[in-house]
Amino acid sequence: MKRGSLGYVLVLLSLLCLLAVPAFTQSRNVTNIVSVVLDDFDNPQESQYIVRGSKFINEAFVDDSGMVLHDHLRTFPTALYREEPEDRELRALGINAAFNRKGYNFVEVIPASEGEDGQLVPDGIPIPGTVRDMSVWVWGSNRQYSLEVQLRDHRGIVHTLEFGSIAYRGWDNLNIDIPTYIPQDVVYVPQRRGLEIVKFVLWTSPRERVNEFFVYFDELRVTTDTFEEPFDGERLADPEYVEQLWSQGEGE
């Protein structure tokens, strides 16, 4: 190789190295992916739901408060726990219902809490971080029913996502990915805007039998990214801290 050509190659390599430096000095995309159980249904006092049926619900399966029969029962999927731990009682949320006629009937399972009058009122389940996927164990009796979940974003818009059919026998772990078109952050501080579970809806297929049936739910879980890039003064992006700070201000 001629000396002039060698010099040209060395200069070219030097330029490539300089161009490559920023790629190595840029901060990497930091994440903290964790799995979080939103509800294990083991504690009836902390796991309260309003369960109600659509128009043709059979009144024999509705209690005095107008809710479809449901309870936290001593059962669980053995694929999740091979045997019950000695230090806790495993439970699942069971629903017992029926409809008077076939059609697009549904049962709503709505997260709730006690209001000031002691009655249950809808109270969505907040999801920490930026959620990537969601799963729930559901026991089906091989009927052509399907399950969906409704999520509320920071704008108050409710998004419906399909878990799919529960036409299988026994327990199965149903999973959904959270689509990127559902916003979970904004450009302003605080940037993260978490989602909230509004309700689950169990639909019956128009041709499927709707006499007495049972459905059970266990371990509602999400995979979520809880990382937030730190910055100077990040506590001032915490609404609770800001409220406390201003309430302690001297004023004029």
Image (spheres, rainbow, N blue to C red):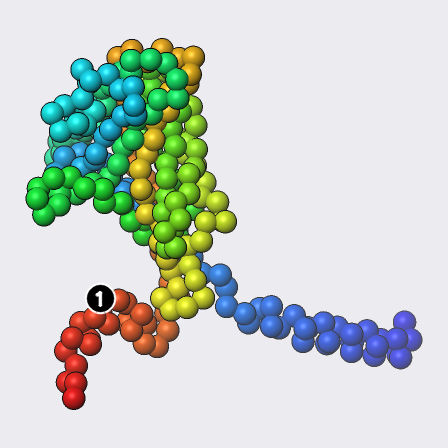
Closer-to-camera residue (2/147): 147
As displayed, is residue 68 above or below residue 99? below
Residue on which disc 1 sits:
240
* Left or right, residue 203 beside residue 99: right
- State the residue at coordinates (43%, 12%): 207
| Amino acid at dot 1 | Glu
Q: Is residue 43 left or right of residue 56?
A: left
In the displayed structure, 73 sits above or below 17; it is above
Q: Residue 227 or 62: which is nearer the viewer?
A: 62
Question: Looking at the rendering, which quadrant does residue 135 occupy?
Answer: top left
Vertical side of 227 occupied by 136: above or below: above
Q: Quadrant of the C terminus?
A: bottom left
Total number of numbered discs in the rendering: 1
Q: Position of residue 78 (x, y in %)?
A: 27, 23
Question: Label 1 crowding class (10 Å Cα cut-off): few <14, some 14-19, many 20+?
Answer: few
Q: 26 above or below 117?
A: below
Residue located farthest toward the right when viewing the structure as drawn? 2
Q: Is residue 205 visible?
A: yes
Q: Residue at x 20, y 18 (%)?
A: 59
| Residue located farthest toward the bottom when viewing the structure as drawn | 252
Q: Quadrant of residue 21?
A: bottom right
Residue 74 visible within the image: no
**Who's the residue at 81% across and 73% down the image?**
9
Q: Secondary structure at mark 1?
A: helix
Q: Which quadrant of the figure has residue 74? A: top left
Extreme front residue here? 55
Residue 22: x %, y % from top left:
60, 72
Question: Picture coordinates of residue 225 (x, y %)?
Answer: 39, 53
Q: Quadrant of the N terminus?
A: bottom right
Q: 221 and 239: which one is in front?
A: 239
Left or right position of 45 against 138: left
